[in-house]
Amino acid sequence: MRKIHSILIGLAVTLALAPPARAEQKYTLGFTSDFLGGIGNQSGSGGSNAGRVLTGTPPFFALYPSLTLKAVGAHSNFNIAYGFTMDHYWSDPEALTTTYHALTLNLDTRIGRRTSLKFSNSLRNTPDVSMLNVLKGFVFTPDGFQSIYEPMLFKNHSYSELSRLSMDVEVTRKSFLTFAVDGTIRRYGNIAVDETWTFQDQTRIGGTISYSRKSGKRGSFGVNYKIYQNDYRDYGPTRSHALQFHASRELAPSLMFTFEAGPSLTEKNQYLPEDRISINFSASLSKKLNTSLLSMHFSKSSGDSSGMGYARDSYQAGLGFSRPFGPRTSLNVDVSAFQQKGQSFYNQDKQVPAYDYWGLSGSAVLSRKLSRLWTLSFGGNYQDFKGQKAVSMNHMSYKRLYVSLSFQLPELWRAAR
């Protein structure tokens, strides 16, 4: 799958940087860097976590530089961003330094009068997505598949990559067809042997065919079929199908509601003795209040990966909030919770238990713009994961408070051709 991702990324870059004849393309290179300092702690009882536990509330400093290249044309939009993170804790008995990288790419282009192509790719070994979202002022609403579990607490060099390619075809003025494929890779790196059953290296690939039709000026409805297969290093593959009906409606000006629900089927395999039928659903609500933005989402999926262990039922809920206070001050909040419901599946005469997990994570940052280039922020983030007593990773928590000074140069370089 790594080769497929490289081919798709190369195709996206080629389409974005090679505009059609006579079409003007504008390029912008931006740079930002965040300098952080504060206190934080990390505690837990998991085997692979034990060597990384931070006792007390040691001070830390961090550096988060990033570069963004944008290309805008008459029929296409393209951006690619690279971010680097470095955290250093003055912990006891020895200091802890971690470094992470993240690379994201997005392309949206028209390839005909009725057809558009979208591609996105996210490659990272930085797990603290929640904090990066609020630090950069993003309000996150999931689009497509995303692992629920993020291994921030282990401060281990895990690797994640998510790619999605979709094509939208305008059938009539009111109806559309969408064809999409996505792939995910998750590698956990150097995890202790007693945790390998929980932290399974895994690969996921899925496909979607969707039909949508506009309903008046404020809504739409449709149906889609999804197929997805997860391959686990020790447990082998599991394949699921889902038929879902979806609808969206603008309930009031600036208030948007979306809903998707339908049956799912997970095929039997060496661990699952028979086909398993369940219900998948998701809902989201977003509200824009003048310059503020509030978004909420809730979802349930069956027979899919969560980033931990084997396929199971997963529930997730989240809240994002962004509000400015005058022209210079803003507040950004990101909160999410999840629960993973285990099930038992069999390997001949050996029963393999799939335990329950649940967790909560959140970040908040209050920012004040000091000048055109500099911003001062105060924030904090929190994560807490728990599992059944039989799980060695039965409780881990992470907290920190920080002050950030951000340098922003959104137009370091500009060009057009």
Image: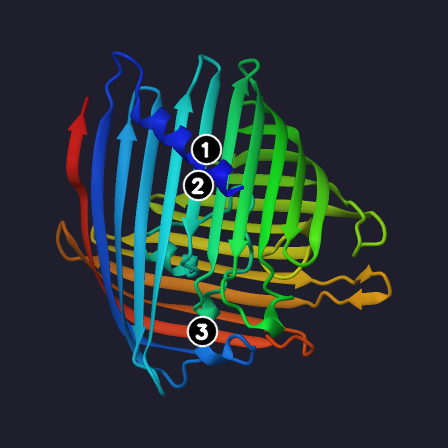
Image disc number at residue 8: 1
Q: Residues within 10 Å of mark 1 (few under 14, many from 20)?
A: some
The residue depicted at 75 percent of the width and 67 percent of the height is 353
Residue on which the image places disc 3: 398
User: Can you say which quadrant of the picture contains the N terminus?
Assistant: top right
* Of the image marks 2 and 3, the number of the one nearer the N terminus: 2
Q: Position of residue 173 (x, y in %)?
A: 53, 14
Residue 302 appears in the rendering: no
Name the amino acid, label 2. Asn
Give the quadrant of residue 367. Answer: bottom left
For the residues bearing labels 1 and 2, Cβ distance under 8 angstroms:
yes
The residue depicted at 13 percent of the width and 49 percent of the height is 372
The residue depicted at 71 percent of the width and 44 percent of the height is 239
Q: Position of residue 329 (x, y in %)?
A: 24, 56
Pick the residue in front: 136 or 310. Answer: 310
User: Can you say which quadrant of the picture contains the C terminus?
Assistant: top left
Mark 2 and mark 3: span between their CA atoms?
Answer: 28 Å
Q: Secondary structure under badge 1?
A: helix
The residue depicted at 61 percent of the width and 39 percent of the height is 206
Residue on which the image places disc 2: 121
Mark 1 and mark 2: span between their CA atoms?
Answer: 9 Å
